[in-house]
Image (cartoon, rainbow, N blue to C red):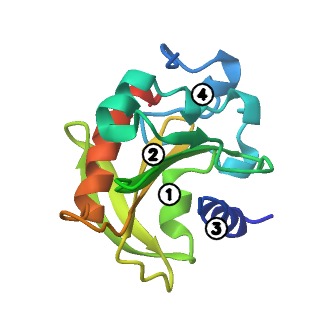
Amino acid sequence: MSFGAVLVAAVVLLACSPPMTGEPKGDRVSQITGAAGTATVPGDASPITDEELFDPCTIPDDVTNAFGLATAIKRNGFPTPLPRWRSCVWSQTGANARFGVSILVTAYTFQELLDNPTKDRFVPTTVEGGHAATYFAEKGEDDPNRCKLAWGTSTGAVIVDTTAFVVREGPREEPRPLVQRWAEAVYPHIPS
């Protein structure tokens, strides 16, 4: 399955579990790593196994609770595992639910994301004090309530995604500031 097909499937499936610390594991990582954001082999050729990819559901509860997800439903984003991907989805519930968020971690590189013909509207930004990142959208997607942001790691890439819910009372969340806040909150807990 091509990277484009996998990423499209990953995003479609995202409609609606102690932090990893230290250096990535083993000799396989040294075969692919460069500086953070510069994995040096394509995702399909990565020696990192699916089990070695960071599990975003391990983001600490104190981080997600502080973000407004204390009563959220948390679950794996893929009902059936996808090769080269891991994901986690949090969704606020109840009458005052304002947003849902997700994190996808992949062995595919940041450059592969930028080169993917199913993606467009790239807008460069930074996370965590200067790490290069980009906002992007799926080609043809025009959802004013959704925003995605991605950055590279030494073993692939990370995508954070937010959806602002329509609310009955008070102002709704604005998607771009929401995804930026989400990225800043979780970035320190995702291996670079």
Q: Residues within 10 Å of mark 1 (few under 14, many from 20)?
A: some
Q: In front: 68, or 110?
A: 68
Nearer the observer: mark 3 or 1; the answer is 3
Q: CA distance from mark 1 to mark 2?
A: 8 Å
Check disc 4 and report its element: helix, strand or loop: loop
First along the sequence among labels 3 and 4? 3
Marker disc for residue 12: 3
Marker disc for residue 152: 2
Q: Residues within 10 Å of mark 4 (few under 14, many from 20)?
A: few
Q: In front: 118, or 175?
A: 175
Nearer the observer: mark 4 or 2; the answer is 4
Q: CA distance from mark 3 to mark 4?
A: 22 Å
Marker disc for residue 17: 4
Nearer the observer: mark 3 or 2; the answer is 3
First along the sequence among labels 3 and 1? 3
Q: CA distance from mark 4 to mark 2?
A: 22 Å
Q: CA distance from mark 3 to mark 2?
A: 21 Å
Check disc 3 and report its element: helix, strand or loop: helix
Q: In front: 125, or 56?
A: 56
Q: Is residue 2 above or below residue 52?
A: below
State the residue position of label 1: 111
Residue 54 x, y percent position in the rendering: 59, 30
